[in-house]
Image (tube, grey):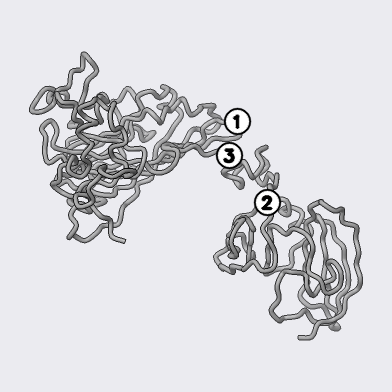
Amino acid sequence: SSQGSWNSYQTEIASGSWFHWAVVYNGGAASNAERLKLYTNGQQKTFDFSGNIPTTSADLSGQSATLSSPGQSFTGIMDEVRVWSVSRTQTEIQSLYEQIIPPMTTYLEANWRLDEGEGYDIYDETDHARHATRNGCEWQQYVNHWDSDSDGIADIDDDHPLDYHKAFDNFYPASNDGTIAFEDIWPCLGDADYNDLIMGYQFQTITNPSNHVIQIVGHFTIRANGAVQENGFGFELPDASSDVFAKVSVSGYEHTTGTIQTHASGFESGQDHPTVMVVDNITKSMPGYSNTVDWMVYEKPTTITIIMDVNEGSTMVADDFSISTWNPFIFIHKIRKNEVHLLNYSPTNLANTSNFGQCADASNPLQNLYYRTAGNVAWGLDFPVAFDYPVENTDISLAYPHFRDWVNSGGTMYADWYDNHSDGYRKEQFIYQVPE
């Protein structure tokens, strides 16, 4: 269609100030007199437009509009561009123009946040995926101070800018998933490949603007199950406040065998410290010998998400949970009392301690020595990163030559034995290779 003619509209815009512009088309009035409405900072500036709205392709440069000198592009900084499929009312515009909005908001056709800061691609957050391209302009650094959920925390500092109940995320481990690795032949020693369970983990502690804990989310990803036995996995919070029992509820665990008894809150019954049993039969999520034998079909990792919700109005803080001192463990072949913990981590109230001192175990509860051999070898390992584990039936010391040095030194030497930052630290032929 041909472009019509505009009435002139002018307003004073202070240099260096941010303004919100919204142009609303009402859908075609009678007598070929169509109306456009212009809003600046939510205030209506009505002007007339006669003719049809152009339907040809265009950009957002302002090239064909009188936004600066005639025939020139818009001179300024642009941010938070949205296109709607309906005529927005003044109330709707005023309610949202200083906020970010959910990308799935009804009638939102495109939402370009313009937060990329580099490159030429501009991402549309909506499902319509109307991604754009930067052309003839440069990225500028700008920090907005909106508070979209009105919780007193600016969006730039708010990890949950659309939820006034939540403000900050804290992660353990801080950078990315950690890994726990277990042998399940305790109290004896087996093939020492430490792949009977390879599980990635990360805890997300969510707090409100007052730094009170709202929720803790634990992500547990089963990456490999090199066991033939049907083992379970759980964790204890040995340094948690006793308030956790009364003020927190747990969900998301997978219990299928009837071996786990829980309180109504979801914590395991019979425990002095809060204990969450994540899964009672790992083979239900991933079959035995999965992802430990190179020639077998690769199984996609499975994630179990544990949610610990804090009662509304509680003033608990992160230290009340002490996630960093968690006590992860497996139990062997659906026998709940047969626990296997990390080196010198104590058993829970429900563990059978009669195997202490049997076979290769050299536990000595009087000295707080648990789940270790006389040579300081453990049945479980904890890594702050994703661990590349040995293939089936391969001693970990073949894959990682400095592992024994680390063990024999009591952890004082080669603390980074699992890293790959230098020659001689690992032998790839003994490490399971995840298919690309």
Q: Earlier in the sequence, mark 3 or mark 1?
A: 3
Instruction: Report helix, strand or loop for mark 2.
Output: loop
User: The disc labelled 2 sits on which kind of residue?
Assistant: Gln
Q: Nearer the viewer, residue 230 or 63?
A: 63
- Location of residue 69 with respect to 402 vertically, above or below: below
Distance from the alpha carbon under mark 1 to that under mark 2:
29 Å
Residue underneath mark 2:
141
User: Which residue is the extreme one toward the left?
Assistant: 359
Image quarter of residue 130: bottom right
Callout 2 environment at 10 Å: few (<14), some (14 to 19), or many (20+)? few
Asked if 45 appears above or below 308 in the picture, the reply is below
Assess whether mark 2 and mark 3 are in contact (beta carbons under 8 angstroms).
Answer: no
- Residue 354, horizontal then vertical, whole percent: 13, 23
Rendered-image quadrant of the C terminus: bottom left
The residue indicated by pointer 3 is 167
Amino acid at circle 3:
Ala
Between 93 and 130, the one nearer to me in the picture: 130
| Residue reaching furthest to the bottom | 1
Q: Which mark is residue 210?
A: 1
Mark on residue 266?
A: none
